[in-house]
Image: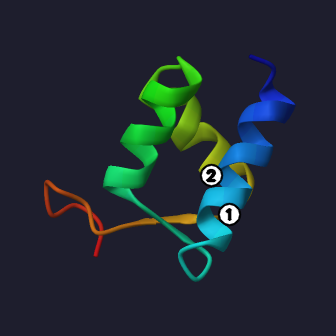
Amino acid sequence: MSSEEILAAVKEAAARHQGKLPCAVAQELARKLGVPMLAIGQAANELQIKISSCQLGCFK
């Protein structure tokens, strides 16, 4: 999976959630794409998309 494909998938997922990426959605996206969570987090950072609804309470 290329970084461009990951970026596009993260951007699309965030668009469905008012521009933020819920933690559970990020985890599911990583499983679906077969990439580590770190790759999803890095893509979100690069796109300046905030992670929301963190299951650990780290991000609100």
Tell me: 11 left or right of 58.
right
Residue 42 occupies quadrant: top right
Residue 55 occupies quadrant: bottom left
- Please tell me the numbered disc located at residue 48: 1
Specify the amino acid type for callout 2: Asn
In terms of depth relative to the viewer, which is nearer, 13 or 60?
13
Tell me: 31 left or right of 19.
left
In percent of width and height, residue 44 lies at: 61, 51
In percent of width and height, residue 20 lies at: 53, 72
- Few, some or many residues within 10 Å of mark 1 (<14, 14–19, 20+): few
Tell me: 18 left or right of 54.
right
Query: Is there a contact, CB below 8 Å, between mark 2 and mark 1?
Result: yes
Quarter of the C terminus within the rendering: bottom left
Q: Which residue is mark 2?
A: 45
Determine the residue positioned at 81% across, 20% down: 2
Determine the residue positioned at 53% across, 75% down: 17
